Image: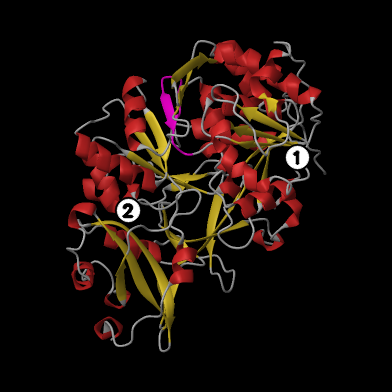
Amino acid sequence: MEVSAVEGLMQDYELSLQHVLWRIERLHQKKEVVTKWDDGVHRTTYGEMVPRINRLAGALKRIGVKPGDRVATLAWNNDRHLELYYAVPCMGAVLHTLNLRLFPQHLEFIINDAEDKVLFVDQSILPLLKPLLGKIPSIKTMVLMAEGPAPALDGFPEMEDYETLLAAESDDYPWPKISERMAAAMCYTSGTTGNPKGVVYSHRSQFIHTMGVLQGDNLGVTENDAILPVVPMFHANSWGLPYAIGMAGAKVVFAGRFSADPKSIVELSEQEDVTFLAGVPTVWIGLANYLKESGKRLPKVSTVVCGGSAVPQALMETMDSLGLRILHAWGMTETSPLGSVARVYGGHTPEEALRLRLTQGRVAPGVEIRITDPATGEELPWDGVAFGEIQVRGPWIARGYHNGYDPDKLTEDGWFRTGDVARIDADGYIQIVDRTKDVIKSGGEWISSVELENAVMAHPKIMEAAVIGLPHPKWDERPVVYAVVRPEFKGQVTEEEVREFLKGKVAKWWLPDEVRFIDEVPKTSVGKFDKKVLRAGATPIKEGVTQEARK
């Protein structure tokens, strides 16, 4: 006998960002939003911000923004940017955050590819915009977010003033009914290979991702927190924090254009009782150095979320010694970006707990993960030994790119190919060993550039290290280390000293053929090591070096 399906009797409630805005307005009016500007610290509250968000939505409608239109931002982490985070998607348009650290040609491509209609720009970023003038025809209106007296706009077309636009509108805006499947925001990948590609987030994905960020076993944002997101608001949703902060009702502190300055981060954290920081490893390397030099400490900071690239063990141990506990997370633009978090609970020795904290953790609830052989596509076991490409699926994982780029990123059975190579142990802890493009194949065996980098950075005199594979006539590729020596030891570290330090810490055949000392490892626009720049400028491996390593 055939049994018919029975539907549940729950309301068909659209999961949209309008609900987050509702919570800000109804529950969190008194919570502070703090921004450091050039002329000092500016304070407002969610209660004061909501009418401005309404006015901004009205202004967008008046200048011709329609549902689905892309509205671009070229802005720092600040309160106005947060207003745009809410007004644009909640009125039915699509927020497109532009990476202000990209080269002009990449920005030109991204704006034209997205067909942005309106562009909001911070005054201090105008010089970056100037080379694009005349090359971005889709932009019909530019809005200047001034930071003082109106600047001279020589060479620029007429621009609207942000505050003047808002002043002409009503505090009440009739928010339209939003479908949860509508696009809410766009963010482009950083373009490390080829042109950047647009990831388009829906209201539904943003809502569910926000709930994921709030979970105690994930980032665990609560109303008791004061959060300083060092991660830029133009990068991967600022890791979902702007909406998680609004949903929870946490205080938020923005460092503006000073977000990468350790002194500003420390001072704001002290002044505003910050409990929660978030940023990439290079930020925390600088912060740790400043704390050690200044003697200052941040006892109220309970969580330092670190993502973007793997955390070196030496950095985690240094931060521990300074009273700052790193929470390691993994994700990417295409995963909204939360993919996994390295929470570690009781029952482990301190050494084992440290090892697990250095992994990328366990996959976030709502996301499924597997590893596959890059050559055969065969799924590999979670045994802590086999490693293959990470593939993920879930409600906040991309299923494609804007304009149909890179259709092969999705497998036939619906999994997203991340390009990260990892092993997963029997308890589900993920250890990323490399990117598929960065893993080094030497003599038919794989070498993890990430693990070798971490081993080098454990050297007490080394501040940063990046490893690339360079061609070799016999072994296909061999590893070469590019190392930055700590300032106090400059000129005092030798290639042989580094290689000797690595012996017993990595396999003998992993020992680098060369250690090349440089002043700084080149970084991508989001603070990751830019290995393509190293490869482009790399000279061939010298003949006859480290024969012992290849025996």
- The picture quadrant where one finds residue 449 is bottom left
First to last magenta residue range: 221-231
Q: Is residue 227 magenta?
A: yes
The residue closer to the viewer here, 39 or 33, is 39
Check if residue 166 falls in the magenta segment: no
In the picture, the disc for residue 431 is none
Please tell me whether mark 2 sits on a helix, a strand or a loop: loop
The residue at the point 74 percent across, 41 percent down is 116
Relative placement, left or right, of 484 versus 125 is left
Name the residue at 60% across, 49% down: 334
In the rendered view, does 53 fall on the left or right side of 240? right
Q: Amino acid at mark 1?
A: Ile
Cβ atoms under marks 1 and 2 closer than 8 Å: no
Quarter of the image that includes the C terminus: bottom left
Quadrant location of the N terminus in the rendered image: top right
Q: Amino acid at mark 2?
A: Pro
- The spot of residue 399 in percent (x, y) is 68, 51
Q: In the picture shown, does residue 14 fall above or below 448?
A: above
Residue, disc 2:
312
Q: Residue 221: percent from the left, percent from the top?
A: 45, 28
Its colouring scheme is secondary structure
Question: Is the residue marked by circle 1 packed among few (<14), some (14-19), or many (20+) residues within 10 Å?
Answer: some
Mark 1 or mark 2, which has the lower sequence index? Answer: 1
Please name whichever residue, 489 or 269, is drawn nearer the observer in this view of the structure. Answer: 489
> Compared with residue 47, is residue 363 higher up or lower down, i.e. above or below?
below
Compared to residue 365, the image places residue 368 above or below, namely below
Residue 457 image offset from top left, x and y in percent:
28, 58
Give the distance between the C-alpha atoms of the residues marked 1 and 2, in whole angstroms. Answer: 42 Å
Q: Which residue is mark 1?
A: 139
